[in-house]
Image: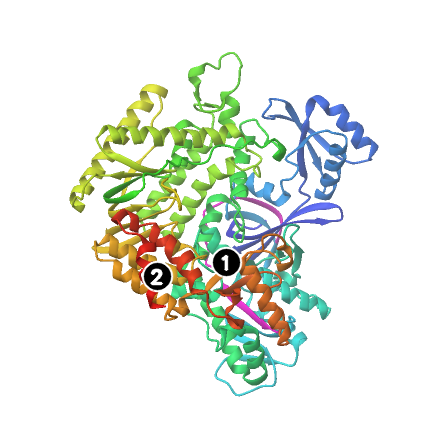
Amino acid sequence: MNSHQTGFLLTRQNKEINSQSLVDLWVKCDDHIAHLLIESELAVAFILTERLSEYKRVLHSQQISYTLKETQLSTFHHQAVTAIYFTSTHQKRQVAQYFEQAELPIFENDIRLADRYLMERFICGGLSFIGTPIQRKNHIEYRNVKIKAAEVTPSFSKVSLDIECSEKGILYSVALHSDLDTRIIMVGKPEETELSIEWVENEKALLLALERWFQTFDPDIVIGWNVVNFDFRLLIQRAKWHNLSFRLGRSNSNLYWRDSDKNRQQGFLSFPGRVVLDGIDALKTATYHFSSWSLENVAQELLNEGKSIHDPSDRMGEINRMYREDKQALANYNLQDCILVSRIFDKTHLLEFAIERTKLTGVELDRVGGSVAAFTNLYLPRLHRSGYIAPNLESENWIASPGGYVMNSKPGLYDSVLVLDFKSLYPSIIRTFRIDPLGLIEGLKQEVGIEKDQAIDGFRGGRFHRTKHFLPSLIESLWSARDVAKKNDEKAFSQAIKIIMNSFYGVLGSSGCRFFDHRLASSITMRGHEIMKTTRELIEEKGYEVIYGDTDSTFVTLGQKVSSKEADRIGHDLVKHINEWWSEYLLSTYAIESSLELEYETHYRTFLMPTIRGSETGSKKRYAGLIRKDGVEKMVFKGLETVRTDWTPLSQTFQKVLFDKVFHQQEVKEYVRKYVDDTKSGRLDEQLIYRKRLRRKLDDYQKNVPPHVKAARLADYYNQQAGKPAQYQYGGWIEYVITTAGPEPIEYRKNPVDYDHYVEKQLKPIADGILPFIGLDFSELSASQLGLF
């Protein structure tokens, strides 16, 4: 045995060798890469003790070898369970099928061996281990391993990867950008160039050169843009076509691809010893939102920089041209994609975010989403130590819980509106009212000695034990850590904590989680409704009017224009009063301390709450306002056309300027008239383009075919006429305009623009949302222009 080593988990796998299960872990240490092999790890599940004889009959009939062990554990229905062990996970899966056929329940059968091994040791990324070392070429292998949790974060080496290929998927080049080495491996005859290009004879040589690069420079993390479902998927396909093993993993291991059962456009990549982080998935997991997820658009929005290509409308044609005529330009373009991805990761701290999320929850660094997995990792080992096993998924018994509180709004144009927000309302409800799966089971116990005052009543029959629970304390520790992170300006850490805390409610309300119970989710959302309604009453008792409420935010009109200083004073006074009221009320009514924390968020100097189109009823989740932040005025739009991708630039510009003029009490009649005039006269034609995403294959749209699908079908028809490949058959983004003949793609427009469509469908709805509040009518203003045409 050697001395203790510490490191951070890169990848985990279950393996089977000679019908024996093995946990395979790759770990990044400060001074080396460690490959930990935990052999003969038994696969475990749980069965009902009272029906042991039935289970044994099934096992005997199938001649299955197994081991039984008594436990002190029980189900949520208080049935005793026995642990059943198998030498391989394959054997465990087989037995589960036999039990299911015999209608015998088996519990926790779906927990993967490697996940269970790590979670039961509370390992979240960092670990300490000891074992027998065996020196390999680029790493140290360890046998007879023992591990435990540790706080450690080494530095990781990473590479940004991007490929270029023909429309048929034939590889032209692959670019690699890292601190280790930057180069473009390209098929072609050597040319003089300042770029670092490794020239290769053909596609097979390119794949072998890429394999050598990974074996030589040995990066920990690979980043890219759609890098799993496009780049690596194609690389694996091309390697297979050339009969190459394609050993890009550590220890010369092969890459493996598995198609998704749900989406033929997606799949899963097994990359032993290396982590692959896709920029799109990582940004979505970190709750970023963009109008388009193309690298060009995201780079423009985040970096104010895009990709260098002469003809974006025919990207494929341009890439083919560069490959034929100007390979150095293609190499530069290829490398630029890598650099943009690296800069996006640096700008948004995506790698740091992924690391912190793993340290908090134990999910894999490259896990997409993973809220349910994170909750299971944190909760399951704690549950076992309290004497319970987890329930199985029971989607068919799913009962919906009420959503967040949304109050009917009072439409109008207001001066001085305050927004008061409850800080992390759902996590604070969980903390305050002890909402927790274990707490529910213990709170509902009808045994002697469980008095009513030992439980807190929830909703729909839920009752929660005052002391037997884990989730409230988990949230409390995360809450404290986030306060420290915000104080230290650790944005990635703070964001990771916020997402995890807020996901706990979503998990408990999801039928995809084994701990789902409608009494849990309802006790959170219905308590939220109660809190929001009572808070509204408390505000109105102070003489102010609440015009809207949404999940955790309350909008309060002060009834007149007041200075920012006075608005701030009123906001802070209201918050102080309401927080004190809740503290006193919860202590006297439930004998619990309040974790509810109302904050004064914003003062809107002018605020619009519009009506639902075509009615006098106030809208929900749609508003606009004018705030002053850091001495600068700013327009805020929520849910309105200017922030929605299905509205044209024509309408978005119109809304921003029109609202700004109204909010500043400027004359708007002439502006509206001129904008309609400019639209109809063709002076704003470049702003008429609709841009929409095709979320399904074109052939899947049969009934009620929407305009963007009609445009895409036209585009592909003309593509085929011109000898070009079909572009939209499997989805993508289409740009089109509405003409007198209907929707037409911009690259193949044949008919005049239907300007009346844009006035009626793009400008009128926006104007009707605000003009009536200042006594004006869009139809009258635009009608006065008809004499010009």
Residue 450, compared with residue 556, is above or below; it is: above
Residue type beneath disc 2: Thr
Kind of residue at badge 1: Ile
Q: Residues within 10 Å of mark 1 (few under 14, many from 20)?
A: many
- Residue 688: x and y, percent? 43, 65
Tag 2 residue: 653
The boundaries of the magenta stretch are: 142-166
Q: Which residue is mark 1?
A: 280
Dot 2 crowding, Cα within 10 Å, few <14, some 14–19, many 20+: few
Vertically, is 447 above or below 168?
A: above
230 and 487: which is toward the camera: 230
Tell me: 517 left or right of 403. Answer: right
Q: Is 147 within the magenta?
A: yes
* Magenta run includes residue 774: no
Of residues 599 and 739, the one nearer the viewer is 739
Asked if one can make out residue 243 in the rendered structure from this viewpoint, the answer is yes
